[in-house]
Amino acid sequence: MGGGYYSQDIAREARSSGGDVFGFQAYGVNAGTAASRREVHPILNIRGKTRECKNETPIVVALDVTRSRGDDTKIVYEKLPTFIGQIELKGYVAGAAISFCGIGDANSDRAPLQVSQFEADNRLDEAISKFWIEEGGGGTGQESYELAAYYYAKHTIIDSVQKGKKGYFFFVGDEGFYPTVNPNHVTDVCGREIPAPIPSAQVFKELQDKFQVFFLQPKKSWEERKADVDAEIQQRVESAGGQYKNVDVRASLIWNNRNDLDLHVICPSREEIFYGHKQSVCGGWLDVDMNVQGETTKPVENVRWSRGTAPHGRYKVIVQNFRFHDSPAPTDYRVEIEVNGEVKQFKGTISPKGETGIDSNILIYEFDFDPSKRKQPEAAPTEKATYAAYDDSVIRTQWATVLPAERILPIEDPARILDVMLGAIAITEGKASLDAFLSGLKGSHTEHDLQQIRIALEGLSFQKSGGPNVDPGAGGTSHSGSTRRL
């Protein structure tokens, strides 16, 4: 509930000894058997539970733990003693208690939401170190931030709000959120029932009734982000025993529910490779076929010709929804096709009207293969269109529909995450100007570090110093007038 005292000595000892940090493998009681189920640690499981904070200042640190941002959690753990020490030393807020939240993708991950109790003592170290850093994600440019917003808005008891004092909530990630809160996700993850989808804008607005909410966006290069997206398909193919590398032709299909989507490839011999005919006389092979029984929410199918075996001629790649195992709703998919070293990405939605079998067929790509012409990957314009959902500006634009723009804080180096959080608290509380806050960091930070922190916080500082005010519930709509504490 937030009682106790955080000992810096105990924290330093825990970090110097190594201990059981991020070693939780999320195996259930039947580990090692076919019936085992991987779950979050019990202290982070929120099914049917409410988190409560009686302290004066609740702080939530909600971290994206998918592939692109998994290391941020480790950085926060290492720097947590300094963060808490600075809050106490500078007196930026009184009676702080922190809840950690790990965010994945409820459409595909086994641990889409992990939430610790609000604590003020060294139980904080235990809570964050028990995170399952699954490094999953659905490959859509979105994660389940809206589900986290729903849980904290609806199923937390924050005593300070009753006294007119909001807490602080920091999302840390580099992707967008889904447009609605899915009732199935609420049931599966939170153990609650809602009658219909809730617009994400609504739950973010309700979250801001309890907390001063910020989105911290650590940056990655375009190549790094593209590699994260591509790695999802490769990881699924190879984990299932399929061949991803050293191919002439490869078609890989992924989706994120238990429905039985099928990959069909018509090859130059006019054979159709699919679940009923997995190997062709011309060397093609459906080497991964999943969700016959709806066994996973992270399925993949893979058809490939090993290098040096694909025949010259015309190929067609088709996706079909064979049957529904989940509810008969449209299913988003991604297909990656490699031909002679050239990789193309396709995405879409199948069964918009509940179609199955041949009625659901979608022709993805038709191409000619010439074994004598090995090509290089296409240039960036095609890639930019394919990966548009991961573009920083697209992500910032979406977040600006639910948060004031000055509360979307870009960060070049993830090592500065907690510095930026601390600065946001100091400035919002009116305890320090941006210049005064940065001055207090001199000696422990380089000039480059200080410049990064300034860039992240300068918009927020402008608002607090008398710039145009933005209502936190208005999704970034500006209003003229004097600055007020939001």
Image: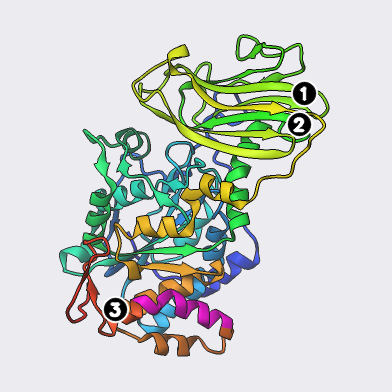
Q: Judge whether residue 62 can be spotted in this image.
A: no
Query: Counting residues from the N terminus, which is met first, the one under dot 1 or under dot 3?
Result: 1
> Quadrant of residue 197 in the image?
top left
Which quadrant of the figure has residue 409?
bottom left
Q: Residues within 10 Å of mark 3 (few under 14, many from 20)?
A: many
Can I make out residue 308 in this image? yes
Amino acid on which the number 1 mark rests in the picture: Ala
Residue at 44% in and 60% down: 393
Task: State which region is magenta.
Answer: 448-459
Identify residue type, mark 2.
Val
Instruction: Return the x and y of residue 171 as percentages of the image width and height.
Output: 40, 59
The reply to whether dot 2 and dot 1 touch (C-beta < 8 Å) is yes
Nearer to us of marks 1 and 3 is 1
- Residue identified by numbered label 1: 310
Q: Secondary structure at mark 2?
A: strand
Closer to the N terminus: mark 2 or mark 3? Answer: 2
Magenta span has 457? yes
| Quadrant of the image containing the C terminus | bottom left
Where is residue 9 shown, x and y percent of the image? 54, 74
Q: Which mark is residue 247?
A: 2
